[in-house]
Amino acid sequence: MNKRLTGATMATLLAAGGVTALAPWSSQATPPGEKTVTATLFERPFAEVGKACKDSLGPAGYGYVEVSPATEHIEGGQWWTSYQPVSYKIAGRLGDADAFKSMVSTCHEAGVKVIADAVINHMAAGSGKGTGGTQYSKYDYPGTYGDADFHGCRKDISDYTNRENVQTCELVGLSDLDTGSDKVRSTIAAYLDSLRQMGVDGFRIDAAKHMAAEDVQAIKSKMADPGFWVSEVIHGGGEAVQPEEYTGVGDVDEFRYGGHLKSAFQGGDVGGLKNIADGKLPSDKARSFVDNWDTERNGSTLTYKDGDLYKLANAFMLAHPYGSPNVYSGYEWSEKDAGPPSGAEGWTDMHAQQAVTGMVGFRNAVGNAELTDWWSEGSALAFARAGKGFVALNAGDGELKRTFTTALPAGTYCNVAKAAPDDCGGNTVTVGEDGKAEAAVPAKGVVALHTGAKS
């Protein structure tokens, strides 16, 4: 959840067992394994996530899928109801525990690991009946938490330069758990352990910024086997809490990355993207993304509404070596609070589009190969990945035609941004013995070649 929501959304929000402790461990830098790209299928029902793993994510080579929160939550059609837990039962609009377990199993069979979005900073605001039938009121969630389990600052966060205010007061009226309490830590750890027992491979920790880093680490240390973790910590200049504090827990979402992409691609000068890592988290601690459900609504990043420019930004993210890429796949919306579609129509399906899936294969093929042969001019750029891959991106309004230095072995390659290698007719580029190739890059288009996709 974003640390700051619109006034209208805030008003709507306001109206609306112990585990053996283990010693701390070092963080896992980037998701473990050779396939490090994640697809976030925001607000997709669990059954549909399983189908996506089988039909598109697994075949494309994604290593991970991130799913929206698996908890009972407040009733309502808005997307943010998923981020107001009532209990830790899996009884929300996305499916029940059986659907969740089936989804994990299906994804694993397709070679895709599962990251669960975990809402552990807070519980719901207001009072009422949850999606699983639990009757609750603020600070009283039967069977899970009572009044003593919450921080004493029972007012909204008002000063982001004050650490205590950020981490003990309430995020837009949501009851703030006392994560310094051993009981609360044990309850959260038991919930996360239960998801691990269902096969979940790791967690995205929602609103981690609003919990002390030592509290998050303490929860993780109580778990039997915590898996991979990535924390949501939004950077803010001059603020008391910074993303770097959480790299000891695991990876951290790098919010500055998407903003940098937006300014470069919309500003007409992409040359600075060569050094996109400058001023951000170290590459081996950062999860990179073009956008997510918060940033697509607050205007800080490119979104699906930017069309081909958005696909260009995703292609760049997947081709450039910085961070561990997270491809966001949500749904079309006009009202910012709007919840997910109820049927098959309305999803962006960004995770399954060739412009993206081809680049997932590109990233898997180039691995850790060094970035070389950078070229940029105005709205266009190109670079190689040390004899493994080559990409050219054109954010301009006209076709770009030139001879590129690809650093690839001689041969005819499939442009994987346009076509799958097994059906590449008309989408090939020939590289000469000197490693150079003449290529035409369409307006708002991409040419991407790698050694695993020769024609």
Image (cartoon, grey):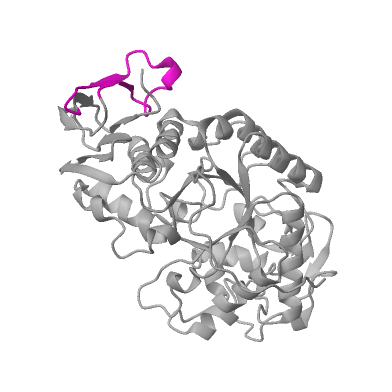
Residues rendered magenta in the picture: 410-435
Q: Is residue 409 above or below residue 86?
A: above
Q: Position of residue 105 (x, y in %)?
A: 72, 40
Q: Position of residue 86 (x, y in %)?
A: 75, 63
Quarter location, residue 312: top left
Task: Give the side of residue 161 with respect to residue 228, left or right.
Answer: left
The answer to whether any part of residue 348 appears in the image is no
Closest to the observer, 113 or 41: 113
- Residue sitting at 45 percent across and 17 percent down? 422
- Residue 138 drawn in magenta: no
- Residue sitting at 37 percent across and 25 percent down? 418
The answer to whether any part of residue 373 appears in the image is yes
Quadrant placement of the N terminus: bottom right
Task: Give the side of residue 391 with respect to residue 303, left or right.
Answer: left
Closest to the observer, 386 or 399: 386
Q: Position of residue 362 (x, y in %)?
A: 40, 35
Closest to the observer, 372 or 320: 372
Task: Give the side of residue 29 with respect to residue 256, left or right.
Answer: right
Q: Position of residue 73 (x, y in %)?
A: 72, 58
Quarter location, residue 125: bottom right
Task: Give the side of residue 152 with respect to residue 365, left or right.
Answer: right
